[in-house]
Image (tube, rainbow, N blue to C red):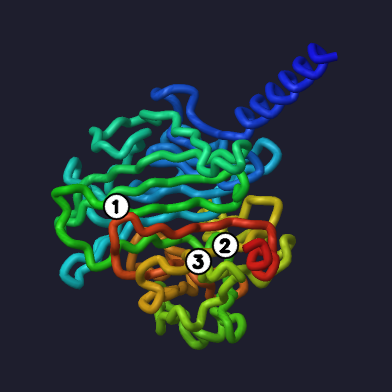
Amino acid sequence: MKSFIFFLTFFCLLHISLNAQDRWIRPNDVHDVAKWGIRQGIVFSLWPYGLEDAHAIYGGGPRGLIRVGVERSGKIYLLNFLAIEPLVDGKIEFSEISPSSVDNRWGKIMWASDHPNPTAFYPTANCRGVISHPDDARPELEELSIYVFLEKYHSGAHPYLKLSIRSDRPDELAIQLFNREDSKQMDYCNITATMGNYARLRSLHLKEGAIDSRVLYKGYNGIDFIEKESYPASSMLRSLDGSYFAFATGNEDIQALKAWPVDSLAKSKLGWRYRPPLKFTQYWRSEQNNGSDNRLMVRVNGRYRYWSGGSRDSTHYMKIPGGAAFENFELRQPYQSGQKIFFGISERTPQEILDRF
């Protein structure tokens, strides 16, 4: 009987271990694609690799951005990009636009490592990611983490990141900010979700209700970004554990979101056509007592026409179906080494997400 119990326990533990191994999406070795994530949850990759099958090798978006999406039933869908935007002496630099010191072209070069010790750029994954057990009371809980390094900014800012996904929160990417020893003091180091127009995010959910981008930017039909005021922490929704949340959602059903015009300009902009089979809530979360609660802000800007590479020719810019939508979406707070924020992509509604915290 004791032998039976022993073998039953052994096989149960083996089954749990195998399931845990199956849940993670990560490189097979250092020469593999730079892509990490969790099945049925959030996935991210680094340039030059995209997320979706058609763009897995050397493609899938600009340099200087972290690609973020979701995995559903074996298929990965891109939903947004994350940019790193440090401010030094009041001046901001954008990781996707700031020229590289390597070739003077747009976009800072990024690379990954399993540890926080600085390494040199490596054009493939360079690491598999470290799986740890962050809670001794819950040995089944796992966390996948990597460090992301990037070249120094012209301002002297030299940040790096730790990106983590917990197995009990597969919809969230934890982003922890640090700086290299040679970095100039950063006033802020903003992490911005830069592609809200793709999912046509039009509702910003705050404490007093949802702000509609079409109302906020009414009357604007230009080719540039449009930005109005930011929103303080006091306007943000909060969960029972004290976390601050900013949610962005679309206003269309999935059929309308996936529909696409058939004119010649629209045919040249098929990269903006929504591909996932589901709609998602995108959100930022900051834990309570993060050191700068009273200076936390939600910042958004919008567009009436899809981005078209910086051209000033208005004929290159396609109107966003349904009207203006939010494009850049971020939490902004003064920089402190080790500060952490969370970016989430979930099928749940904002209220359902709040209820989980």
Dot 1, how many residues are within 10 Å of its Cα: few (below 14), some (14-19), or many (20+)? many
- Residue drawn at x 75%, y 22% is 9
Q: Are marks 3 and 1 in contact (CB under 8 Å)?
A: no
Give the farthest residue toward the top.
3
- Which image quadrant is residue 53 in? top right
Instruction: Give the residue type that dot 2 points to.
Output: Gln
Is residue 3 left or right of 126 when viewed as pictured? right
- Which image quadrant is residue 350 in? bottom right
Nearer mark to the viewer, of 2 and 3: 2
Nearer mark to the viewer, of 3 and 1: 1
38 over 338 or under it: above or below: above
- Residue drawn at x 36%, y 59% is 339
Where is residue 236? Give x, y as percent: 52, 78
Label 3: element kind: loop
| Badge 2 or badge 1: first in the primary sequence | 1
Where is residue 40? Give x, y as percent: 66, 43
- Residue drawn at x 59%, y 86% is 208
Tell me how far mark 3 sits from mark 1, CA to CA. 38 Å
- Residue drawn at x 53%, y 75% is 324
Where is residue 191? Give x, y as percent: 38, 60
Q: Which mark is residue 318?
A: 3
| Badge 2 or badge 3: first in the primary sequence | 2
Tell me how far mark 2 sits from mark 1, CA to CA. 24 Å
Instruction: Give the residue type that dot 3 points to.
Output: Met
Instruction: Give the residue type that dot 1 points to.
Output: Phe
List the residue tagged with mark 1: 178
Label 2: element kind: strand
Give the farthest residue toward the right.
1
List the residue tagged with mark 2: 282
| Residue 347 can be seen in this image | yes
141 or 114, nearer to the observer = 141
Nearer mark to the viewer, of 2 and 1: 1
